[in-house]
Amino acid sequence: RDEWEFNKQAGFTEEDDALPDFFYDEALPPTGKQARHRTTEVNALMREKVTQLAG
C-alpha cells in the first residue's frame, strides 16, 4: 500500500506497470515461456488482497 501511494505521488500510473507487448507475444529464452497475466488483472487482485488484509 505504501509503495502504491509513493508511486501515485511520484506521478506513476498503472500504465507504467505494464510489460511491453512482446512479453506476451514472444517466447522468452531460456524457457520459451510467455507472460500470462496482464498488469490490470494482477493490480486488481493485489488491491483486493491488500484491502482484505487492511480490514
Image (cartoon, helix red, strand yellow):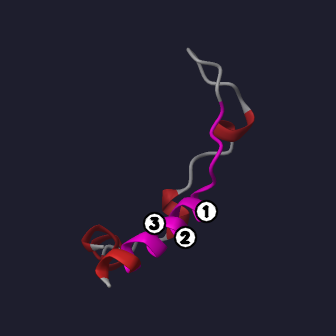
Q: Which residue is mark 2?
A: 44
Q: Which residue is mark 3?
A: 46
Q: Amino acid at mark 3?
A: Met
Q: Quadrant of the C terminus?
A: bottom left
Q: Which residue is mark 1?
A: 41
Which residue is located at x 65 percent, y 20 percent?
Answer: 32
Magenta-drawn segment? 34-51
Q: Amino acid at mark 1?
A: Glu
Q: Is residue 53 above or below residue 16?
A: below
Q: Residues within 10 Å of mark 1 (few under 14, many from 20)?
A: few
Which residue is located at x 61 percent, y 45 percent?
Answer: 20
Furthest toward the bottom, the residue is 55
Residues under numbered marks 2 and 3 in contact, where contact means CB atoms less than 8 Å apart:
yes
Q: Quadrant of the N terminus?
A: bottom left
**Quadrant of res 8:** bottom left
Q: Position of residue 4 (x, y in %)?
A: 34, 71
Q: Position of residue 37 (x, y in %)?
A: 62, 50
